Amino acid sequence: MAGLYLSVATRAFRRYSTYTAATLAGMFTNCVFGIILCFVYQELWSLKPHAGGYDVKEAITYVWLGQAMIMTVLVWGGGPTNDLANRIRTGDVALDLYRPVPLIGWYAAQDLGRAAYHLLARGIGPTLLGALLFDIRWPGSLGAWLAFAVSLPLAVLVSFAIRFLVASTAFWLLDSSGPATVAWITAAFLSGLTVPLVLFPGWTRDVVLTLPWATFIQIPADIWLGQRSGWHAVEGLVLGAAWAGVLLLVCAFVLRRATAKVVVQGG
Amino acid sequence: MTSTSSADGSLIQVRDLHRTFTVRRKTSRFRGVRDEVVAVHDLTFSVEVGEMVGYIGPNGAGKSTTIKMLTGILVPTDGSLSVAGLDPSRQRTELARHLGVVFGQRTTLWWDLPLRDSFAVLQKIYRTSPERHRANLAEYVELLDLGDLLDTPVRQLSLGQRMRGDIVAALLHDPEILFLDEPTIGLDVISKGRLREFLRTLNAERRTTLMLTTHDLQDIEALCDRVIVIDHGTAVFDGPLADLHTQGGSTRTLVVDLVDEAPAISVPGAVTRRVEGPRQWLSFPADASAAPIVAAVAAAYDVADLSIQEPDIEDVIREIYQR
């Protein structure tokens, strides 16, 4: 089974890497937005130093980490789960069900392969540019690097599970674009992409930091920046693993309901 | 190849199969009623190893619903079902290893990647041994003439090429049963012919059981020894193609060109359907011999030419539906 998933993930990686022009255009966008946000954050932190417990350098670093994670965790949605939504709408999902492979594993493997590509191309590229243009902070220890590396696949899995659930609504609604819109707006806000979650006031901050979307950007970034270290970092990883586990179980449950109750479209 | 089959030896065993769908119908803006729609009703048939069965019926007759139940992605409402000795909906994953499925209008191939990649993933999916996989791939690629296309991304293939790719994909794990849903839809005459030829070879050499749904009756005539006609969810005919003609009350037509114009010919065993100048059309039952009729016509009239038109299967099936 591991061999199969690896093989599927490799193909997904290769599939996304075939569109070089799209990748370059996307990297350019990340860089432009990154630079603009850096200027905004510099201004913001000069007015209010140590906002959210970050200094300017950490805030700037956060910008580039956010840009790196947008495509890696697909804050805006999309990826293989989009294919799934389309295949449910057209009925092609029937062919996925004919294969002796669990549907969730099949799509999750594709999404991890895709995320690996997006991390390399859309993540590392802009971050290096950010490091050239601005003064950014790097992880302070091997442990921080390792914890950051573990936080990434967890973030992708949590994001995948949410997108899988959104796509599954197509089994009932046929068109999942409504739920998808709600999902990306929620994700943009609660992942810390729009505003770092550490800037949320009072108790709302504690709440948003325990929600699944916190694992997308805020937790990996805090591990990178050393804001979360030691047990605090482990706690962040456990949160990610727990959300991934719970949400994937929900996916399995929903899929079972869907295939038992719902008509697969088309003749 | 090992063959699994149910207790009585049939590869596919369908008994009193039912499937109803609940459909919500809107009666006003906020209210709706639930309607029961019967898609498959009292369906019984069995298929033996190595058969090539045509499963035909008009749109909405229940063909796809049956195929979905046979492959385990739909649960029957009632009745019993066994395919390769397994219960499809309970043992879907296990059953998948025994089945190949091809949909003319759907694809299982990776759109953005070369054919080769899709085939490589399939080897992992079905855990086919590398030797077996290589041998099958080489053979099917040769037979379906895909050698030059293995490195072409699927999105650049023509419909016919993609279709052949999908068929290879369905066969790499040596399935015992191949379900084909409209496999020749949209293909040109040459591609259709080639595909039929390939399916015949497959059945002859590997004893692969084929079950084929189609609207293209030439597919049936070219491939199937047996036809199951389904209408309103139930089998209205099940038997050899030749019997379909008898059952459907199908007729052959004797076209007679007389030397001179004459009133409608009257001979025993045939009815004159049409007269047009010196040419007349006589119809007689498809299973009757043409010889006595020809002899009777020739004895009574000055005949310039004679020809016999075979019955059209489409007419026959239309006849069956209308009963």
Image (cartoon, grey):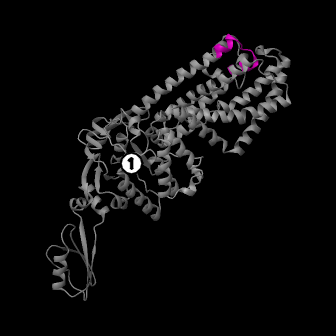
In percent of width and height, residue B181 lies at: 40, 50
Q: Going by the image, does A255 lie left or right of A144?
A: left
Residue at x 69%, y 29% (from the top left corner): A69
In percent of width and height, residue A210 lies at: 62, 15
Residue at x 63%, y 41% (from the top left corner): A14
Residue at x 81%, y 14% (from the top left corner): A50
Query: Can residue A140 be spotted in the picture?
Result: yes
Residues drawn in magenta = A217-236
Give the letter of the chain under mark 1: B
- Residue A31 magenta-drawn? no
Q: Going by the image, does A181 lie left or right of A63?
A: left
How many callouts does the rendering have?
1
Classified by dominant secondary structure, the portion drawn in magenta counts as helix
Relative to residue B61, is residue B37 depicted above or below?
above
Q: Residue flagged by tag 1: what amino acid is it?
A: Leu
The image quarter containing residue A37 is top right
The residue to which callout 1 is attached is: B178
Callout 1: SS: strand
In percent of width and height, residue A186 lies at: 62, 26
In the current view of this chain or complex, which residue is farthest to the left?
B268
